[in-house]
Amino acid sequence: KQEVTQIPAALSVPEGENLVLNCSFTDSAIYNLQWFRQDPGKGLTSLLLIQSSQREQTSGRLNASLDKSSGRSTLYIAASQPGDSATYLCAGGAQTGANSKLTFGKGITLSVRP
Amino acid sequence: DAGVTQSPTHLIKTRGQQVTLRCSPISGHKSVSWYQQVLGQGPQFIFQYYEKEERGRGNFPDRFSARQFPNYSSELNVNALLLGDSALYLCASSRASYNEQFFGPGTRLTVL
């Protein structure tokens, strides 16, 4: 059974700081790893998708890496801004037969102080 | 292109009632998945449908059911509501069952 862990649960940083959000998973048989952003009471916005054959993906100030052998993924946010304040969730995609599903961590709530 | 849409946005029900939540996928997407997110937790997988067939079910009781229509839209039904069913219900669509999933805004269900 896949378990995804995100530690710490909350993080507060000053504006402009570069930061890394960590995600660990127990089952390396994932076919992709997605990072999402969730604003309070809202749905999920997909930030980055890393296929199992890839090591990293970049979009603007965001860079995500994937190391299947160690069961870890990181989301790097450069030059953080107050608008980056949100909850960040990672999810591992696994396929069993015809079924595929995402297993989520509990998320890291990020606060960027002006 | 429109994203994933869900209706209603909010819903208040009492214990024992039944509820139906609706989801329209992104045009061209044939797979729809449903997730339940309780406050402070990550989303939990409920169902996946692809080409109108159930492809997977999470660890939820039989009070939860779903279906997918010929136009790939989907409904999630929950019977005999319990207080613990209060949550944000998220729908996600993808081109196929193993592709990147795109989420809708969710339906906030409150059970009193």
Image: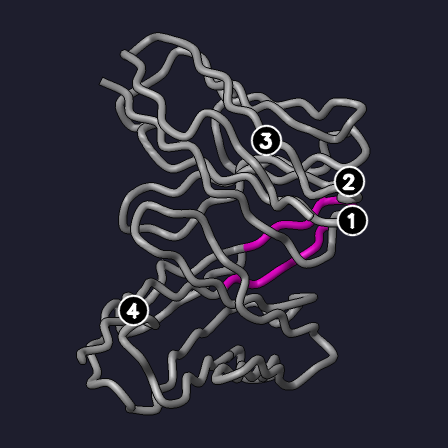
Mark toward the viewer: 3 or 1 = 3
- Labels 2 and 4 in the same subunit: no
Q: Which residue is at a point 50% across and 27% down the rendered structure image?
A: B7
Q: Is residue B34 above or below residue A19?
A: above
What span is colored magenta in the figure? A91-102
- Amino acid at dot 2: Lys
> In terms of secondary structure, where does tag 3 sit?
strand
Is residue A94 on the magenta stretch? Answer: yes
> In terms of secondary structure, where does tag 2 sit?
loop
Q: Are marks 1 and 2 in contact (CB under 8 Å)?
A: yes
Q: Quadrant of the N terminus of chain A?
A: bottom right
Q: CA distance from mark 3 to mark 1?
A: 16 Å
Q: Badge 3 is on which residue?
A: B23
Q: Are marks 3 and 4 in contact (CB under 8 Å)?
A: no
Dot 1, how many residues are within 10 Å of its Cα: few (below 14), some (14-19), or many (20+)? some
In percent of width and height, residue A86 lies at 32, 64
Numbered tag placed on residue B96 in the rendering: 1
Q: Is residue B108 above or below residue A59?
A: above
Query: Given the image, what chain letter belongs to the residue carrying mark 3?
Result: B
Query: Given the image, what chain letter belongs to the residue carrying mark 2?
Result: B
> In terms of secondary structure, where does tag 1 sit?
loop
Q: Badge 4 is on which residue?
A: A85
Q: Are marks 4 and 1 in contact (CB under 8 Å)?
A: no
Q: Badge 2 is on which residue?
A: B30
- Amino acid at dot 1: Ala
Dot 2, how many residues are within 10 Å of its Cα: few (below 14), some (14-19), or many (20+)? many
Q: CA distance from mark 2 to mark 3?
A: 12 Å
Residue lying farthest to the front in this orientation: B1
Query: Given the image, what chain letter belongs to the residue carrying mark 4?
Result: A
